[in-house]
Structures are given as C-alpha cells and as structure tokens.
Amino acid sequence: MLEFDIIIVGGGGAGLYAALWAAENTILKVAVMTKVYPTRSHTGAAEGGINAVLTHSVGDSKEAHAYDTAKGSDFLADQDAIDIMCKMGAAVIYDLAHRGVPFSRRPDGRIAQRPFGGASFPRTCYAADKTGFYILQTLYEQCLKNNVTFLNEWFLLSIIHNGERVEGLTAWDIRNGGVHLIKAKAVILATGGHARIYWKRTSNALGNTGDGSAAVLRAGLPLKDMEFIQFHPTGLAKTGILVTEGARGEGGFLRNCNGERFMKRYAPEKMELAPRDIVARAIQTEIDEGRGCGPNGDYVCLDLTHLGEEKINERLPQTREHAILYEGVDPVEELIPVAPTAHYSMGGIDTNKYGETPIKGLYAAGECACVSVHGANRLGGNSLLDILVFGRLTALKAVEYADDASDTNPSLAKQKDDERRILGLMEASGKENMADLRKELGNVMMKHFGVFREESLMKEGLEKLKEIKERAKYVKVYDTSKRFNTDLISVLEFLNLVELSIPIAIPAIERRESRGAHARKDYPKRDDKNFLKHSIITLKEDGDYKLSWKPVVIKKFPPEERKY
Ligand SMILES: Cc1cc2nc3c(=O)[nH]c(=O)nc-3n(C[C@H](O)[C@H](O)[C@H](O)COP(=O)(O)OP(=O)(O)OC[C@H]3O[C@@H](n4cnc5c(N)ncnc54)[C@H](O)[C@@H]3O)c2cc1C
C-alpha cells in the first residue's frame, strides 16, 4: 500500500503551488497525484493574466481590488476570504517572478499590468497571452527541484474518511491498471472545475469533469454554490475555444451585425470591460433579439483590427493563432466571430478561508473549491490568483495538521467497492451509449441551465437530468484491458459529470433571484432579503439530495446596486 503524509490530488496551478509550499516547509512525505501529466493540466490554458496590486500600481490599492472582487461577485463572495486573497497578491506575483515566470515587462523593467473586466485599475499581470502556461511550467520545475513525488496518470476514485478525519483515498493506476488504496494523513483536492458538463460549448479541457467534487459528494460532504457557472463572453463561434479577456483589455471592441459597439447600451462606462456576466448577457441578448452576425445570426464580432499587427503579435499572439486556425480569420484584418461559452465553476467543494472541509485533514483548493472568493461571478484574472493564494495557504494548513496527526488506518472496504464498481461497468448491458448520453447531458445543461434561466425550463431540465442519471446505469466500458484504458477513464469522467448535474440544477431552481451568472428571466432582480446566502448541497445515503443555506460573510462592502 502506498503511503504519504500529504497527498495532493491535482497537478494544475493549485496542486503544484500547494506541493511546492508543502515540500519547502516540511520534511513530511508529500506527493502529487494527477490524471494527466502535470504540465498538461488546464492551468496551462490560462491566457490573459493574474490580478494583483503591485508596489508600482500607482493609484490602485488592495482595498480597491477587494471592492471590485466583491462587487463583481454580486456580493455573494465571503469578504474575509477576498481580503486574504487581495492582500497576498503581490507576494504571490513576486514569488512567481523569482522562481522564473517570465512576466511581460514595462519599458522600465517592472512587471506590466493590463486592464481586465470589472477592475477599476489595470492590475492584471501577464506573460503575453500564455500566462498559465508559463506558471505551470515554472511550478513543475520547482516541484522537481524540491523532490516532490509525482504519481502521474493516476485517477482519483474515492476519498476515505471515518466521519471525523481523512484516512486516504483510492485511485486507478492508468498506466498499469488496478485500484490502489493510498494511505495519507492529509489530502488536498485540487482537481479543477467542472464546466465540461456543458459539453456542447465550453472553453474547458476535456478533463475538467469535476472528479474531486463528485468524490466529495459521494463521500457525503457538502458542495457550495453549484448553481453558479460562468459563461465567458468570447468563445470562438465555431468551437467555444476561448478568446482571452486580454483582447478586450488591450482595446478590442464588440460589434453586432450593424457594426454597433452595443456594450454602450449595457455598461456605458466600462463598455467591453464590464464583468463577464454582464458582457455575456449583452451578447446573448443581441443574438436573441436578431442583431447577431453571420448567416444564422448566432454570434457577434470582436474587432481587434485597430490595434495593429505589432501589438497583436506582441500581446495577443495566441489569440491570433487560434482565430486563424479555428475560425479562418486573421484578426489583424478581420473581425473574430464570438459567442458565450461555458467557462468556469464558481461553485465547488465547500471550504472555509483556509481550504478546510468539515473532515479533518481533508482540504480543497483551486477551481474545485468554493472558498468563496468569486461568489456569483468571477472577475477575469482572479482565478489564477485564487488557486495560488489558497493552494499555498491550504498547504501550510495541511503541513501543520499532518505534522501532529497520528497514523491512519483505512479499511480495505473502499478499495473492494471500487474494484466491484469498475468490474460492474465492464459487465454492464451497454444498452446506453456513453458518447450519445454525454452529448445529451451537454445539450440539456446548455438549454435549461444556460446564460438565461427560468423556472419551468429548469424544472423540465431537472427531469431530463434525472432520466440521464438513470440511463447512465446502463453505460458500458467495452475495453477490459488494464493499461491506458481510456474507455474506462472517459466513462468514469462522464459519470462524475452526471453526478454533478443535479446538484447544479436543484439550487438553480431554488434560488429565485438573479445574481451574477445566475440570470433568471422570471426573477430578474437580485433579492438580498431572501438570497444573500450560499447554497449547500449534499447527497444523502438514500440517494436523494439535501439543500441548505449558509450566510455570506460581509465586512467592508455592504451589497449595493452593480453599475458599470
Ligand atoms: C481557456 C481558459 C483560459 C483561462 N484564462 C485565465 C486567466 O487568464 N486568468 C485567470 O485568472 N484564470 C483563467 N482561467 C481559469 C483558470 O485557468 C482555472 O480556473 C485554473 O487554472 C484552475 O486551476 P486548478 O489548479 O484549480 O485546476 P487545473 O489546472 O484544471 O488542474 C486540475 C488538476 O487535477 C487533476 N485531476 C482532475 N481530476 C483528477 C482525478 N480524478 N484524479 C487525479 N487527478 C485529477 C488534473 O490532472 C489536473 O492536474 C482560464 C480558464 C480557461 C478555460
């Protein structure tokens, strides 16, 4: 049986930064387990940058960053957690720079910052439009330098706890096959988001299937604010692949079929740099009201032509590459067709501001966690900051805990259960086809829980999700081999998405207001009297769900009307 003091599940930005800070601050045995090779983690796709107030951010302040974040969240984020995140911003950026992240620079050599949506100052630090890529590569090198053990291509199945403390986990070894029980005093989940549930149209990698969150749900533990999924305003029209907010930060315009910069009707002051929920709704409204572009009127256009080739090549090289490759347009001369795409999970594993869950020794950090610093709508550039700040803090908490914790003694029961489960999938009837059902799931999520929502549509959607969950029992894994069984992994990922779908739907129906990314046509206003609270959902032993609510931490910034 493998045994570690601290095991971190996830090799993205949150997991690697946690591993690095744990490894540098203890002699305990620290390991990272990841289903993909670490540098293929989704953090590598982050483009536009990371927010922080630096020493040379003249006029800006940590308080302004905190205010922008709270306002952007539609006042659902916990302000004590926001405070921690914004205060640690500069420390994280300088730490990354010292470790080797090649941030883009101003002419005077200091780290450059660009404007981003919902921010009152240009505070987004960037490395061209490949910020996440550079962060991930640097952190991986640093982890290797610090002798972090890597279990690459291992798939988390279950979390083992005794109701009070965590005891370890079970995982499938993708390279060799087989279910393993891994003993650990502390487990940090850093498994990323679940926006792949919108299979039809998303900016997310194939692996963003919420595996950690689904394991938490199966372990009887709470998920928070699951109804909040961010739609990024500018996904490429044909594929949903992201065009970074950095493109608008560098001065890009949005135009409808009349060539009009329509954002002036939705956010007259901030225009294209309003927060994402507002810009996504504006684009969707233009499309729905017949002012979309193209033969089907199903997209609007992002205009970068006035920026000039030199600036586009220097600041937005990947955006140009993607537009040419996937849309067949060169942004130097042509407009880029864009429409909203499912992008980010604001909700996730319920933690406090230190990444702690109700089970001792079990932590969550990164996009899989809901701390909550993003509330109902995340600001661009705040996720990379969130994953690093809370990855680091959570690691220090885990070190403190594991240092004093006694050995664990997990029973073999979970391992046996998981072996039976996998065998069951291989012996299933195959009456249902996984790929078809996954497509159906994505279509239902998009149609019934999309940019705009309403009660009857969502209730109808919930019934369809229940039916999909039932039908998913008949999905079969056809490949019975052990090594690199990608059929098995795809089915496990699909089943995790299915498990998370109803926990998104239930609070979405019950939250009878519009807040941030949760925009209801039947309840168009925010309702602080009844819904200034986090939703908490758990899976009961009888297979039903329990929805409850938890207060939001409000400190310096009382809720106010959001105007941009
Ligand atoms: C295209 C795109 C661009 C973005 N740009 C920005 C940006 O410019 N600025 C910003 O702030 N945010 C940006 N974001 C958001 C940000 O990139 C993510 O929220 C963040 O990188 C998530 O990091 P993470 O470490 O939590 O998860 P990830 O980087 O997704 O890593 C998850 C890890 O968990 C592992 N894992 C998952 N399931 C299992 C399992 N079952 N078993 C074992 N391991 C598992 C994976 O292998 C992976 O290593 C962007 C998002 C997208 C989609």
Image (spheres, grey):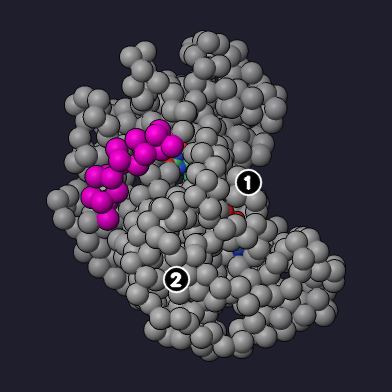
Q: Assess whether residue 17 is covered by the magenta stretch.
A: no
- The outermost residue toward the front is 27
Q: Amino acid at mark 2?
A: Ala
Q: Earlier in the sequence, mark 2 or mark 1?
A: 1
Residue 186 got which mark?
2
Image quarter hosting the C terminus: top left
**Residue 212 visible to the viewer:** yes
Q: Residues within 10 Å of mark 1 (few under 14, many from 20)?
A: some
- On the image, the x and y values in percent for residue 468 come to 66, 71
Spatial distance from mark 2 to mark 1, Cα to Cα? 25 Å
What SS does tag 2 mark? strand
Q: Residues within 10 Å of mark 2 (few under 14, many from 20)?
A: many
Image quarter hosting the N terminus: bottom right
Q: Is residue 114 above or below residue 32?
A: above
Residue 75 got which mark?
none
Residue of label 1: 40
Q: Residue at x 27, y 34 (%)?
A: 53
- On the image, the x and y values in percent for residue 311 come to 49, 14
Task: Report the side of 428 relative to 513 (left or right).
Answer: right
Magenta segment: 81-99
- On the image, the x and y values in percent for residue 330 come to 64, 18
Question: Ligand 1 closer than 8 Å to the CB at disc 2?
Answer: no
Task: Report the side of 61 relative to 297 (left or right).
Answer: left
Asked whether the residues under the numbered discs 2 and 1 touch, taking CB atoms below 8 Å apart as contact, a structural biologist would say no
Q: Main secondary structure of the magenta part?
A: helix
